[in-house]
Image: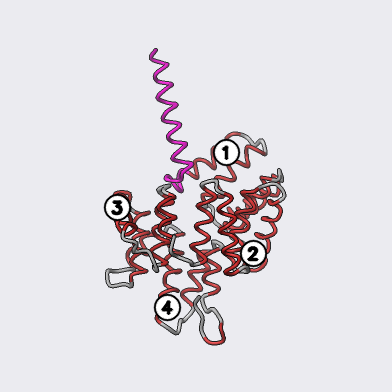
Amino acid sequence: MSRQSGDVDVLFDIKNSFYIGNYQQAINEAQRVKPSTPELQLERDCFLYRSYIAQKKYRVVIDDISGSSPTDLRQLKTLADYFNNKNKRDSIVSSLDDHLSSRSYDDNHIGAVVAATIYCYEKNYESALKALHKDDHLESMAINLQIYLRMDRVDLAKKELKNMQDKDEDNTLTQLAQAWLNIAMGGDKLQDAYYIFQELIDKYGSSAVLLNGQAVTFIGQGKYEEAESALQEALDKDSNNTDTLLNMMVLSQHLSKPSEVANRYRSQLIDSTAEHPFVSDYNSKMAEFDRLALQYSMA
């Protein structure tokens, strides 16, 4: 952990803003803070550029980082390049595979996170877990937990959460991981997840990430009006947030709103992120429907 005199983590606000999805706040904090060592400066810059990537401002990262930049930053440039340029993705993944086979992500936190992020996007969860295998950073544990939940391995997610709690029970990432696990478990755990999100909002301010988390707990409990209020606030913060648009689309069905309301959110989702898994699946099904319809019309 990055610390200076007095055992104070000078990057605390930057990291917490990033983890809860307040990316602009993380950027503002990163530009304000003056690290006292090269190591702290590099860590600050990593969170700065990761926040730009989260905002889909890939060109800023690509233009700022050069071949002479530190390895960690060059790895983040690779991540921005992956999202920004479809034509480069196969070669980038192939390069990651080479690094993975040579175990070059051992003792390389940023490299492991970048590789795991790309592998998750490719839905190659096994390789993502391999990339993170030797990294005992709390953030890597949180990513592991998310992967286990995507794989419907709640049992493994519980074990990972225990590891995180043993390492730092009060950390924001540990709290978020507990909330994600509670949502996956459902039932009475949904209310527990809501309280965690609310406590983080009270401490650090609301964000689209935290508000969507609350909305999911409300939807799971059939509290649709409360979910709509949380999602509307999330939309006010980021009108193009894909999770918000997707949750709004689902919620409009629960609230029996006119079909054009759900269609509007779907169109906005397609416009904002054409490569979102839901959009890709939707387009695939629409193409299949059109093919079958044409087939029967010609019969």
Q: How many marks?
A: 4
Identity of the residue drawn at 34% across and 61% down: 103
Q: Amino acid at mark 1?
A: Ala
Residue 176 x, y percent position in the rendering: 60, 60
Q: Give the residue pinned by disc 4.
A: 41
In the rendered view, would you say 181 is above or below 27?
A: above
For mark 1, what is the residue? 262
- The residue at 67%/60% (across/down) is 196
Q: Tell me the residue that label 3 is attached to.
A: 94
Q: Earlier in the sequence, mark 3 or mark 4?
A: 4
| Residue at the image point whose x is 33% and y is 66% from the top | 74
SS for dot 2: helix
Boundaries of the magenta span? 270-299
Position of residue 136 measured from the top left corner of the image (x, y, whole percent): 48, 66
Which element carries disc 1, helix, strand or loop?
Answer: helix
Q: Mark 2 highlights which residue?
A: 200
**Magenta segment, prevailing SS (helix, strand or loop):** helix
Amino acid type for the residue under numbered disc 2 = Leu
In the rendered view, would you say 228 is above or below 256?
below
What amino acid does circle 4 point to?
Gln
Q: Nearer the viewer, mark 3 or mark 1?
A: 3
